[in-house]
Image (cartoon, rainbow, N blue to C red):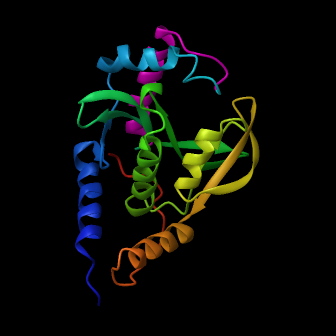
Amino acid sequence: METKDSETKDSETKESEAVETGTLESERIRFRKITPEDIDHLSALYADPDVMRYYPRTRTREETVEAIKNYQEKYVSEGVCLMAAIHKRENKFIGRCGIMLQEIDGEVIPEVGYMLDKFYWRGGLGSEAGIAFRDYGFRELKYPKIISIIHPNNLASQGVAKNMGMTYERNAIYDAVDCQIYSITREAWEELQLQEKKENGNPAEAAEPSEVAPKTPVDY
């Protein structure tokens, strides 16, 4: 049996530790569970009309308080939800990203969602965050498919989805809005892992496939 290269081992070790510590990391971002202490940062994010341009409307502080309660409930009931994104170098809250279980046309599917403060746009951080949760969803949670739900006019988010290896799948009504569904299957993700190993000069070793997807996502 071939051994895993050190980069893959380090990545999987960090993701496994995330299950125990409630945090997850990418190169420039640390992700942790959202708490009531994040209300000032999160309410400012949700009140920004530029950030919320492709959402039905901005949110009030009171609505954000309720959103935080909802996130914390889902950490327990579903094992996954949006998390606070903390810029490592600046030690600053810069947005929220994570995996959410969404019901689309009667089917519950994990979605990678991402929203960053506009001062951190166009630096590749959105793609970095999305890829971190994509990899976590496939490696640790063993999902067969992951999606992103995107407004048809939100070209920047579509670009992030494509950087995650997603492709346009179909349109669907979500939150009373006609949205586009981008998706990537586990098989497509494994192929991407193999291609990256080849490009990096590592042995041609695909990511380990999962035999059965878990009924309940792992809590992190």
122 displayed left or right of 184: left
Residue drawn 59% across the image and 41% down it: 157
Magenta span: chief secondary structure:
helix
Residue drawn 35% across the image and 79% down it: 201
In this rendered view, identify the residue nearer to me: 204 or 77. 204
The segment highlighted magenta reads 55-78
Whether 56 is among the magenta residues is yes
17 displayed left or right of 52: left
The quadrant holding residue 31 is top left
Whether 27 is among the magenta residues is no
The image quadrant where one finds the C terminus is: top left
Residue 215 location in percent, x, y? 48, 57
Can residue 81 be seen?
no
37 to 18, vertically: above or below: above
Residue 124 location in percent, x, y? 44, 44
> Quick one: which residue is furthest to the bottom in this view?
1
The quadrant holding residue 71 is top left
In this rendered view, identify the residue nearer to me: 102 or 31. 31
Residue drawn 36% across the image and 74% down it: 200
